Amino acid sequence: MSGAGSALIHDVAFVGQLMESLSVPVFVLDTDARVAIWNRACERLTGVAAAEVLGTREHWRSFYDQERPTLADLVLQGRRDAAPGAGICAMPPRAGDTILDAMFDADSGPDAPTNGLTLESWCDMPRAGKRRYLAADASPIFDARGRISAVVETLRDLTDEKMAQAALEQLATRDGLTGLANRRCFDDTLRAEWARALRQKQPLSLLMVDVDNFKAYNDTNGHLGGDECLKRVARAVASEMRANDLVARYGGEEFAVILPNQSLKGAAIVAERIRARVEHLQLPCRFAPGHVTVSIGAATALAAPDNDASQLVAIADAALYRAKHMGRNRISLPMSEAA
């Protein structure tokens, strides 16, 4: 350890005592990137005792499975290439990893003092054995000559808040009865998939699935029986989906299935699998053919700038109406394709 680094560890003893009283997790790196302070709150958060890391460069082990810099290291190094996922997060960059402050002023030179850096992200916390959502702030400390003498990083555990936010988002996008995507989620996803199909010049298919004679079934079996029927049909439909497909409760007893990059022929195959799976549930029904069935309308489009996704919905709806008109428990394709 250099003399400057060793001196810092002794010079910050009093400051370290003050930091021990803080409920906020804090650690400090000296100019050699060695840990000068690791307070008790940081021990509790990371599961790593101060004695294990003080005077070492091993603080990264508290946050990552493989060696990589923390935010404090990036500030100390004057790194200009920081990006979401580069700081406290042990996971690859993803939505929700947010750098809030740039490390450098746009006009600063290579030797200019750095500003602080802030990041929010999920972190795997190897020693603590639990995944946490952390907010980190790393700020430089300057000596009388304007040079960095240390970097302080503070951590906040926002896991509970993040989980509560995720739960609210789940409520906003999921149907409470079936657990499928709700109409709002369907509308948003269809617009997004239409835009992607337009960019990538890929087909986009849609299935509209309706439970046959559901009103009569509901009247006969009561609302609880009707709800159970919808939940079982929903599971049957969802079981035929690929990872990038979306099945939603469109409304009442009607479901909608978005099939990205799927031809009409492929969509018809999926539709027939859904129809057969629901039929094989053999949910008892007093109406022909003796158990619950579904009718399905299929449609496919190549996205174009002069039309929109609502036309795809209209075509699939029209195909569904024909399936009902032709006797139910069947699939129907657009008229131009059926001919």
Image: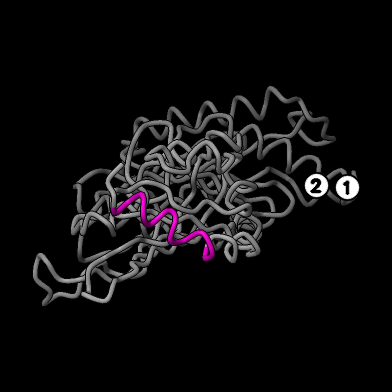
Tell me if 117 is positioned left or right of 272 in this view. Answer: left
> What residue is rendered at 35% in x and 63% in y?
99
Circle 1 — which element? helix
Residues under labels 1 and 2: Cα distance?
A: 5 Å
Its colouring scheme is one colour
> What residue is rendered at 60% in x and 25% in y?
276
Residue 228 visible? The answer is: yes
The residue that disc 2 covers is 227
> What residue is rendered at 27% in x and 46% in y?
2
Circle 2 — which element? helix
Residue 235, percent from left and from top:
66, 35
Tell me if 200 is positioned left or right of 320 in this view. Answer: left
**Mark 1, other Cα within 10 Å: few <14 / some 14–19 / many ≥20:** few
- Say what amino acid the circle numbered 1 marks: Leu
The residue that disc 1 covers is 224
| Figure quadrant of the N terminus | top left
Tell me if 316 is positioned left or right of 169 in this view. Answer: left
Indicate the quadrant where residue 183 lies: bottom right
Disc 1 and disc 2 in contact, CB within 8 angstroms: yes
Indicate the quadrant where residue 141 lies: bottom left
